[in-house]
Structure formats: C-alpha cells, structure tokens
Amino acid sequence: MHNFGLGEQRGHVLLIAGDAAVRRRGVQVAPSANLAALGVVPVSALLNSGVPCDTTYLDGARDPNTVLMRLRSAAATPGPLLVYLSGRLTVDGRGKRLHLALAGTTAGTVRYTALPWEWLGAELRGRPVGLTTVLLDLAADKAAWPLLQEYGSLPASPSAEVYGVVCPPGWHGGGPVVSGYTRAWIDQLRASPGRPANLQLHALAVGAASLPPGALVLPGARELAVATGSAPVPSGGSARSAYGYGPGQAVPLPGEERRRAGQASPAAQQAPATNVPDDPRPHIHGLATAGRHSEAALLAQAWEEYVHQTHGPASGEALHWVEIRADLARMAGDFRLATELWSGAARARLGSQAPTAAGVHAAAAGALYCWTQLKDPTAALATGPGLIRLLRELPALDPRHLELAQHRLEHLHRAPSRN
C-alpha cells in the first residue's frame, strides 16, 4: 500500500519507450525518438508543477518486470506523476489481453517479453485522484486493434487522467521521427506563454497531429462526458486531421450564424469581434467530444455557410469545413452522413488535385472507414456503389481498400432482405 502522506510533495516523470510500431518496413511510431524529444522539455512543463521532481527514462527495456519495478517506484511518489508510454500495442494470443510490446517482443513471446496493460492500472489504482496523468502515443497491431475497437477505450486507472492516441494497424507512419501527437504536445508547451491545461494540450495536439482515419482518441466522448458532466471542454483541437488545417485566418461568426448556432445571447452577438475566439474549431471539437453533437454540427454548418460567402463554395476553405462536418458525423455515429461527406470531399479534391494527392486519399479512406461502420444494410447499399466508383479513380490507393468495399457490397447484395 502506497503511503501518500503530507510530507515532501515530490513529483515524478516516467517516460517509457516500448517496441517501435513497424508496418511493411515503414515506421508508424518511433518511441525512442519521442523520448528523446520529450527529454529536452523542462520537467516542470511536462508535469505542470514546480515541485522537485525525479525523471526516469526507460528505452530499450526487454523485461516487463523491470518496467513494472520502475512503474511501482514512480507510483509511490507522494506528489504529481506523469507516465508517458509510446510504442506498439499487441495481444497475448492465449489470453487475449492487451500488452505494450517491449524491445524484442514477437507474436510468440508476448506473454514473457511484453508489459500487460492491466499492470499499469494496478500500480496507479492506489494514487489519489488528481495527481496522476497518463500520456499515450501508440499504434496497435492487427491482433490488438479488434480488441480496442470492442473496448472503445484504453483505460489506465480510475484515479488517472488519460490522454493520447492509438493509431490503427493499416496506417503508414511518418518514419523514424517524432510522432505528430507527441510533437504537437511539445510545440504547444514551448509556444504557450502560460502552461495550458492537459485537456487543452491534448485537444490541440490531436488537431495538429494529422491522425489517420479511425484512430482511437483518448479521452473519448463517453469518458469525457463522465469527467465533465457533459459540460463543454476547454479550447482544444479535433478528433482528426480535418481540424488541423484550413482557413489561414479564421474570422468570427456573423451575428446571424451565431444566432442559428445558439452559441451566444443577443448581447454577446453584438460584442466586438475581438471578444470572439479567432478559431472556432477547438470549441466545436469540445462540444462534439462532450457528446453535444447537434450543437457541434450546427455550429460547423454555420461556419461552412459563412466560408461559402467569403471564399466561395469551391474554395479550399469550404472543402476544409466539409471534412470537419464529416468527422463530426463520425463522432456522432452518423456513418451514412459521414460517408457521404467524406466521399464528396474526395470528389471535390479530385477536381483540383491529382488522384495521387494525399488529401484525396485521406478523404477516400475516411469515406471507406465510415462506410464499413455503417450497420444499416439499406444505407450501405445506397452509398456503396458511389464509394466504389470513387476508389476506382484512385490507382495509387492500396488495392485492398477497393477489394474490401467490393466484397462487402457483394455480400450485402447476397444477404436476404430484412423487410
């Protein structure tokens, strides 16, 4: 049992690099690079505290018991604690339990060479609420991803704040460099005059990280609603890369759009523009992440209409807001609308970009992912042919994407009618 008395409030930062996540010899997540980058950030900024602090780096560990002992020692600290984990999530083939792969972990040695995920929660469980932050930058392999989809989350401990991202196995990463999510945390810590709250840092990092479609973002809407009582979260980024780029200069909503969005009183609508946040995307994401999907969608639609007026409906700014609305629909579980919006965005990009352009592929991949999540057979049959035509126009796309869509559509056609 840990002794959390009123003695010296000493903190601890524990940075753990697991095994690199590699797909087809391409690096998805490079944990060592992430630790090296975090290592030059002042500990007080990482911990958000000025108390004396110890720092532990674990890079290249091969024995899960070694990691456990370091984790146990860090968890015993009486003051604030930050645990950062980066690497590859995998599964014990026998027990179907999630593990963080360590250096040298293979599919056949998971039970002996990887860190069971529940060990993290077990060690942190006894800590007081409000003193523990867990930060994750992970990628899941093919064995772990279905389990994560089933869970819909990656809990660590009820007493800990957990922030992070888990990228899917089909994603091609940026090589052996610092991950976008971790880099964005570091950039925000360096750029902000005052240290933002962890939740705000997380949201900003997600918005800037160019995450692949379907990436698991933590906290999700369910956990955040519990943590905040469904109240709006502080300013942040987004659940996908659609929020991370777009209009070079965001401008305040006109009074009419704000009235339609229901976001301000008549007195506030008449306030000077300087009183309105320059970028509405953090607030929209906050609404969506807190489960207030209709408000988020209405506000995004109002901004899209305003961009149509100021930049034109065919502008890149307008297309950006289509993609934001697509991801908001995904977050709300409206996968038919999300499929249609992502498909429309991809087609619009094809009007001005090459079929090999990354933006075209990202929008098409978003449409395919949302279509695969569409459980209503009628809706899937209605939107499937258009999606397949789109995928056929992208010769550089992974051919398995098209095969997946074709096989699913054929299966839907063969399935007996449910009417």
Image (cartoon, rainbow, N blue to C red):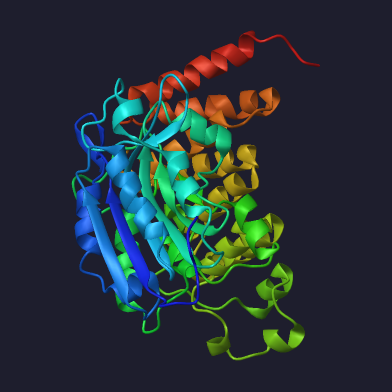
What residue is at 61 percent from the left and 57 percent from the top?
224
The answer to whether 8 appears left or right of 103 in the picture is: right
The answer to whether 115 appears left or right of 253 in the picture is: left
Q: Quadrant of the C terminus?
A: top right
What residue is at 23 percent from the left and 46 percent from the top?
30
Q: Please state which of residues 124 and 97 is positioned toward the viewer in this rendering.
A: 124
Q: Position of residue 185 (x, y in %)?
A: 35, 65
Q: In the picture shown, does residue 313 fall above or below 280?
A: above
What residue is at 33 percent from the left and 30 percent from the top?
397
Q: Position of residue 61 (x, y in %)?
A: 22, 43
The answer to whether 174 appears left or right of 365 in the picture is: left
Q: Position of residue 197 (x, y in %)?
A: 47, 73
What residue is at 58 percent from the left and 42 percent from the top?
338
Q: Please state which of residues 29 and 332 is positioned toward the viewer in this rendering.
A: 29
Q: Please state which of residues 202 and 371 is positioned toward the viewer in this rendering.
A: 202
Q: In the picture shown, does residue 411 fall above or below 404?
A: above
